[in-house]
Image: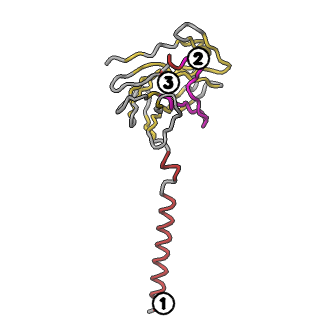
Amino acid sequence: MSARRGLVSAGIAVVALVGAWAVTETAPSAHDWLDPIPVTAAFGEEAVGRNLAATVHDATAAETVIDQDGAEIETGGVWVVVDASARAVISERAVNLGGTRLVVDGVEYSPTDRVDRSTTLAGRPLSIGVDLRGPLVFELPAVPDEAELRLGRGVGAGPVDLRGDSVLVVPIDLEGREPEASVTLPTPALESE
C-alpha cells in the first residue's frame, strides 16, 4: 500500500508542477500588463479606444509639403501625409494626438515638428462628439511599402504615457506608389455630419 501512496503522491506532485509551469508560461509579464491595448481598423473605418476615436481616410507620399502659409518644405527623404479625423470620447481635458507614431520596420516616427504642429491634427486639442479632420505629417528616409499608424492620445504638452491605455492601429499600404511632387496641407477643420 505504501508503494501505491508513493505513486499517487508523485503523480500529484507532477500534476502540480505541470500546472505551475503552465501558469507561469501563460500569465502576462509585468511588461504585458502595461502595454497599450491595440484597437485595429482599416482605412475608412472608425476605431474607438478608451478616450479617442479616429478614422484614417488616406495616406500619400510626397517630396515636398506646402503649409497653410504657402511655404514649401522639402526633405532629403519623403513626407508621408495621412488624412485623418479624430475626437475625444469621454473627456476633452487637454486631449490631443501627442502619442501618435508611424511605425516602419519596427522604427517609430513622430509627427514632424518641421511643420507647425498647431496647423496639423497632431497639435490640436480634441473635443467630445465633434470630429476634427486634418493632416498628420511624418518625415521618413524613403517611401515604405507598408507602415502602421498608431494613434495615441497625448495630454497637453507633457510626455505621453500610454501604459494600459488604448492605441488605435491602422495599417498603411504605400507599396508601389511613387511620391507626388508636392502635397498642400489643408487646415484642420471640424467635420460636419
Q: Position of residue 64 (x, y in %)?
A: 61, 14
Q: Residue visible at 65% across and 18% down?
A: 75
Quadrant of the image occupied by residue 183: top right
Q: Position of residue 190 (x, y in %)?
A: 38, 17
List the residue tagged with mark 2: 62
Q: Residue visible at 48% across and 49% down?
A: 33
Seen from this angle, which residue lies furthest left?
193
Q: Secondary structure at mark 1?
A: helix
Asked if residue 149 is among those painted magenta in the image, a careful observer would answer no
Count of marks placed on residues: 3
Tag 2: amino acid: Ala
Residue 134 showing in the rendered view: yes
Q: Range of the magenta residues?
A: 97-116
List the residue tagged with mark 1: 3
Q: Marks 1/2: CA distance?
A: 78 Å
Q: Marks 2/3: CA distance?
A: 19 Å
Classify residue 133 as left or right of residue 82. Answer: left
Q: Nearer the viewer, residue 144 or 155?
A: 155
